Amino acid sequence: MSETVALATAEVLPAVQPAEARPQNRSVAFRFLTQPGGWIPLLLVLAILVLAFGAPLWGLQDPMHIDPRVADQAPSADHWLGTDSTGRDLWSRLVWGGQDAFRGAAIVLVVALILGVPTGLIAGYHGGLADGLLGWVSDVLMSLPSIIILLIVAGLTHQNADVLMAAMGVFMAPGYFRLTRSSTIAVRAEPYIDAARVAGISHTRIVFVHIWRVIAAPIVIQTAMTIGVALGMQAGLQILGVGDSQAPSWGGMMSSAMGSLRTNAWLIVPPAAMLGLVIAAFAIMGARLGEITGNRSEKAKHLTRAEKAELAGAAAARAAEATQPNQDLMVAVKGLKVTYATAKARVEVVHGVDLAVRKGEVLGLVGESGSGKSQSIFALLGLLAGNGYAEAEAIWVDGQNVLTLPAAKRRALLGRTIGYVPQEPISNLDPMYTIGHQLVEPMRKVLGMGKAEARAYALELLARVGIEDPARVMGLHPHEVSGGMAQRVLIAGAVAGHPKVIVADEPTTALDVTVQAEVLELLRELQREQGMALVIVTHNFGVVADIADTVTVMKDGLVVESGAVGSIFAHAADPYTRELIEASSKTPSRAALDEGGVGAGAPAKGGV
């Protein structure tokens, strides 16, 4: 049941900032450059790049010069990092070696991008034969032992570093191919891509204007990771002896140091530290970019256990003093507030809402999008997001103040005392399991039925909600049924435990008008048969007119008007309520549909 809690003290989170003072969404570049995880590693990499490619300007010693007289010297004023076993200056070789490292990584990156990104776009956007062929090539490359192939290439090309890095780029390309392909497939199914095609926009423009802007972010993140991997693989090959042992390189320096580990272990420290530092910098930048592009909104603040315990304790203390409502009230909510915590503020979205629904009554909770009606219901059901919490003077369900119940007992009310019918029926069914499995499993876990008993009960419920051939439907997956049928399945699941109250959140939003009327009629029939209370959340006053007994109108997180449906329709006191009624005046009612015409939204119940 609800995880509803009360705010114990104002110090738990800072107060809401004025709208003009709150941080606004910034570009990815701005957010990256203003965070320590972005600008610090970027500045470090840029400094190393300038140092390496500006080496001729710094007056460094010749990195190739051998002077046995100063071999194995410790760091000094003449040799900042000391010398190796042949007398070469370690600082000079380390700085010059950066050129080799970054040049090799750049070759790997360019080849991988050129081969992986365009082919991924082609395969993901066009599919078919191109997708199959390119996917097969990618799978073959990923299955080959890359290190062995690279060693063979090194031998055939007389250890040509540029060719070797290009070959490494070929093996890195499948990573870009798979990422680009999967991202493109996800985007190409979006309705705005279909709209662009219908508008006559060319495939090329769709790819580079609409799709590329979406998939660019993961490619940039992949690039940061790829550079680090390329640097590591390049150094690994050099440690194995691939490349010119005399030319300055970080891997070559580590390879030379391997023979002196017992006599001078310091030799391996400078190149290993530099390589690790650069790889870590790119990894941190990639991780930071992933965080930014994965969450463009202001960062949520998930409450700690201590904060949750403090809030819950305050809720229980206040709820214990609440007076039990009239016995015929199935649900009674008093002073409900819903707040979302962010890293810098708390934002209240529902401001002291009262709700009441009696046994056998239908309450219509109505308001436009953003009015707070769904948030109120989520608070009642305990479905608020991790950074959302609620407070209330009391929440009574079937005579129990849920704010005083332990968490386990609150959860136990779900499925038995309270049933829930969500909006968007297809997306609320698991695509991996059949309809039958998703009905039978809760019956076995919640109601304690055996497999055969639960299946028989599921077939009975499907037949009751108007599904023809329920045995066949039990074996179907969600994508194989229509929206109306999926909604009926969800209703069957909601009433399976014979709950005393059903909460239906926009149950007809995604359905055509005829199916809407059928679903509403079904809900009303089930409500009457089982004597349940029904709370239906909607933005359409025509739906309220057809099914509800009482109505509560919400706007901007507040209740602006409530009362009997007939009274509200006849004498709406608030201008906002009148606007909603007028906006729904063209919605066909159940009675009008039964007569075969288009109604004017007149309530189906007499006297309304």
Image (cartoon, helix red, strand yellow):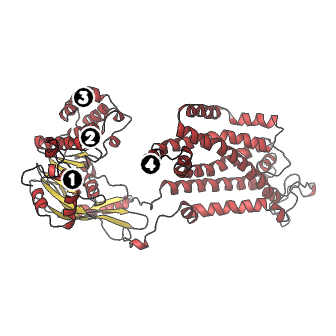
**Residue topped by disc 3:** 470
The amino acid beneath tag 2 is Gln
In the depicted view, which residue is nearer to us: 395 or 185? 185
Is there CB contact under 8 Å for labels 2 and 3? no
* Residue 118 in picture, x, y percent from top left: 61, 43
**Residue topped by disc 1:** 586
- Counting residues from the start of the chain, the first of labels 4 and 3 encountered is 4
Residue 72 visible in rendering: yes
Per the model, the C-alpha gap separating discs 1 and 3 is 35 Å
* Residue 373 in picture, x, y percent from top left: 26, 57
Quarter holding the C terminus?
A: bottom left
- Counting residues from the start of the chain, the first of labels 2 and 3 encountered is 3
Left or right: residue 495 versus residue 208 is left
- Counting residues from the start of the chain, the first of labels 1 and 4 encountered is 4
Judged from this view, the residue extending furthest toward the left is 607
The amino acid beneath tag 1 is Lys
**Residue topped by disc 4:** 192
**Residue topped by disc 2:** 487
Per the model, the C-alpha gap separating discs 4 and 3 is 36 Å
